[in-house]
Amino acid sequence: MEEKDLQLLEESKLYVSSMGKWMKFFAILSCIGAGFMVLAALLLILVGSFIPLAEDLGVLSRVGTGVVGFIYLIIAAVYIYPIIYLFRASAAARLAIESKDNVQMTEFLKNNKSFWRYCGILTIVLFCFYIVLIIGFIIAGVAMGLSSL
């Protein structure tokens, strides 16, 4: 069986180029979003320690703004990996089209796959977390209901 080189049509090259631009755009937006999350986390941790916790803060009065700030830092850290994949894929797409380099096209496809794999795994983890959270709320509600009898 003879091996053939995969060649992209001009229309396909336009799609890859366009995808690379959109990936870079979303990577930049994601960096800005992660930066805002870090800023919010730092504000919650630093400024929140100076604010006396009042009862009207609800959950925050029991949990503390520092814990919420730390959770925001964790979420911002989780955003880093997909941002890296998007930047790498966008750069490889541009190089692949400009230089007609199969290695760069493979790099584009590899990083694109890694981005979507990461998003898929994160989605599964979040769904599992939500299910556990919902079950926990149901158990807590039933327990509170039984304790009031």
Image (cartoon, grey):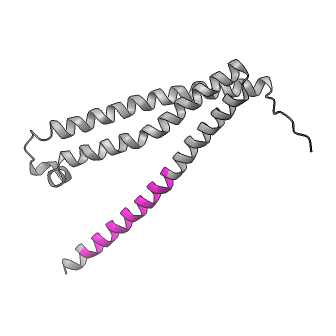
**Residue at x 52%, y 26% (from the top left corner):** 25
Q: Quadrant of residue 32?
A: top left
The residue that appears at 60% across and 38% down in the rendered structure is 112
Q: Main secondary structure of the magenta part?
A: helix
Residue 65 in the image, given as x and y percentages of width and height: 19, 45
Residue lying furthest right? 1
Q: Is residue 48 above or below residue 129?
A: above
In which quadrant is the N terminus drawn? top right
Residue ID at (21%, 35%): 43
Relative to 117, is 83 above or below?
above
Q: Quadrant of residue 131?
A: bottom left
Furthest-top residue in this view: 98
- The quadrant in which the C terminus is found is bottom left
139 in the magenta segment = yes
In percent of width and height, residue 77 lies at: 37, 41
Is 59 positioned to the left or the right of 108 in the image? left
Residue 72, position in %: x, y?
Answer: 30, 43
Q: Which residues are magenta?
A: 122-143
Say if the magenta span includes residue 77.
no
Tell which residue pokes out farthest to the bottom in this image. Answer: 149
Give x and y (percent) for residue 129. 41, 59
